[in-house]
Image (spheres, grey):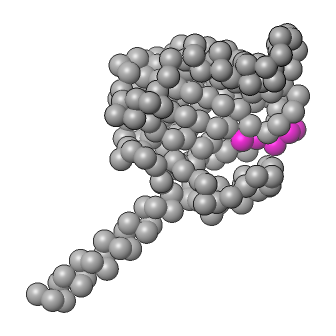
């Protein structure tokens, strides 16, 4: 009996350690639990070590593996970091228009100037969700994408990382990712 308990404990520790290397979040939901996608799938899902190395090659500034959360996916030289927020974490689920207002204010530095010259943001409605995409056109190596299912159960907070030579094509990459998603 004692040996069975020890074997069970060892198995649980090993399996939980393996799981934690690819997925850490506030919720018990992984991306594949709540949606289907030809891009955000187990084939393209990567562990934290690989995500860290890819992220480091894109932009090593302000990088700390201890601050990683959610899941990472990698395809077409684009690194995707996704954190699932549930209705239970409603404090984190804001209306997309409110997120846009705040993001635009931050992007403009609080000044009233036409940010369209250097900043792109857009609402996109597809399948059974809506999203808000934002990024700087000429600087940086990341884009923010907030995806909310139409039932109000889930919000995905996504950061898309890309190399600067892929900047001109990043909106097309994001659109491809969004078109691949269908909430269950």
Closer to us: 118 or 74: 118
Tell me, yes or no, whether the highlighted magenta stretch contains residue 162.
yes
Q: Position of residue 145 (x, y in %)?
A: 61, 29
Q: Position of residue 48 (x, y in %)?
A: 59, 59
Q: Residue furthest front?
A: 110
**Residue at horizontal 31 percent and vertical 80 percent from the top:** 10
Closer to us: 128 or 118: 118
Direction from residue 125 to residue 28 in the image, left or right = left
Q: Position of residue 13 (x, y in %)?
A: 35, 73
Using the rendered view, name the quadrant where residue 99 is placed: top right
**Residue at horizontal 58 percent and vertical 13 percent from the top:** 97
What is the quadrant of the N terminus in the image?
bottom left
Asked if 29 appears above or below 119 in the picture, the reply is: below
Asked if 18 appears above or below 56 in the picture, the reply is: below
Using the rendered view, name the quadrant where residue 114 is placed: top right
Direction from residue 123 to residue 152 in the image, left or right = left
Instruction: Specify whether residue 47 is in view.
Output: yes
**Residue at horizontal 51 percent and vertical 62 percent from the top:** 21
- Report the span colored magenta: 161-165
**Residue at horizontal 86 percent and vertical 20 percent from the top:** 118
Closer to us: 155 or 40: 155
What is the quadrant of the C terminus in the image?
top left
Instruction: Specify whether residue 172 is in view.
Output: no
Closer to us: 119 or 43: 119
Direction from residue 53 to residue 72 in the image, left or right = left
Asked if 119 appears above or below 57 in the picture, the reply is: above
Tell me, yes or no, whether the highlighted magenta stretch contains residue 42.
no
């Amino acid at each position: 009996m004692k040996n069975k308990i020890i074997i069970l404990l060892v198995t649980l520790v090993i399996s939980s350690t393996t799981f934690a290397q690819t997925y850490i979040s506030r919720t018990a939901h992984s991306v594949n639990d709540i949606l289907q996608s030809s891009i955000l799938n187990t084939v393209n899902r990567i562990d934290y070590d690989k995500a860290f190395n890819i992220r480091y090659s894109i932009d090593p500034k302000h990088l700390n593996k201890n601050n990683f959360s959610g899941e990472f996916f990698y395809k077409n030289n684009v690194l995707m970091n996704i954190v699932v927020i549930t209705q239970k974490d409603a404090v984190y689920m804001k209306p997309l228009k409110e997120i846009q207002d705040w993001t635009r204010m931050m992007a403009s530095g609080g000044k009233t100037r036409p940010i369209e010259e250097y900043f792109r943001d857009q609402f996109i409605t597809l399948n059974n969700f809506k999203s808000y995409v934002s990024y700087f056109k000429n600087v940086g190596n990341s884009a923010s994408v907030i995806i909310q299912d139409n039932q109000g159960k889930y919000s995905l907070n996504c950061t898309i990382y890309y190399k600067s030579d892929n900047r001109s094509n990043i909106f097309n990459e994001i659109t491809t990712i969004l078109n691949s998603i269908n909430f269950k």
